[in-house]
Image: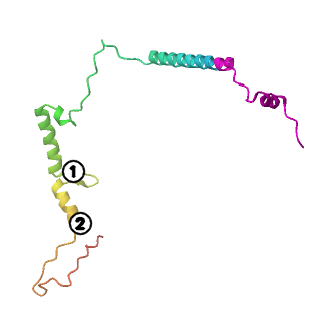
Amino acid sequence: MSESPSQHEQETRRRGYEPDATSLRGVMIFMIALVVMLAVSHGVVLGLMGLYAAAVQRPTQEEPPREPVLRRDILHWAAPPAEYARFQQRWDQRLNDYRWVDRQQGIVAIPIDEAMRLIASDIAPPATQPTQANPNNEGASHDPPAHP
């Protein structure tokens, strides 16, 4: 099943080396095509950047910068001292006075210190005092009180 050598193989054996099949013309065509493709893609990118720059509106130097809007009731450092004092007095009054929130529904506001004391007393177990009959407080229950 011996195949006869092709003409190319016979020529290679005759010369003693494989002929150079690389075409200088083909390499040059590839290089030129590569440079053209790079130039075209560069032009497309520059064109798109120009369109983007034209679409974006940039403020001119003549337009004065906008003044920031400050809420003086929130930013105490931005408020004049007299205005800040009135603001602080209003909040101190709201936090430290008894007042009706909704009289019809019976909702009242109490001072913040009193509210925290009431919440803490609901959460913490009651303090048990030793009695004369039980001076070491043995058998005292430390369970929190049951809430209705």
Q: At x 77% / y 29%, what residue is drawn?
A: 12
Split into 4 quadrants, where in the image is the C terminus? bottom left
Q: Is residue 138 magenta?
A: no
* Of pointers 1 and 2, the one earlier in the residue sequence: 1
Q: At x 26% / y 28%, what residue is drawn?
A: 69
Cα separation, mark 1 vs mark 2, equals: 23 Å
Residue 66, which numbered label? none
Q: What's the amino acid at mark 2?
A: Asp
Q: In the image, which residues are magenta?
A: 1-29
Q: Residue 48 vs residue 37: left or right?
A: left
Q: Nearer the viewer, residue 25 or 12?
A: 12
Residue 100, which numbered label? 1
Which residue appears farthest toward the right when viewing the image?
1
Marks 1, 2: nearer the viewer = 2
Residue 38 at what x, y percent from top left? 56, 19
Q: Residue at label 2?
A: 122
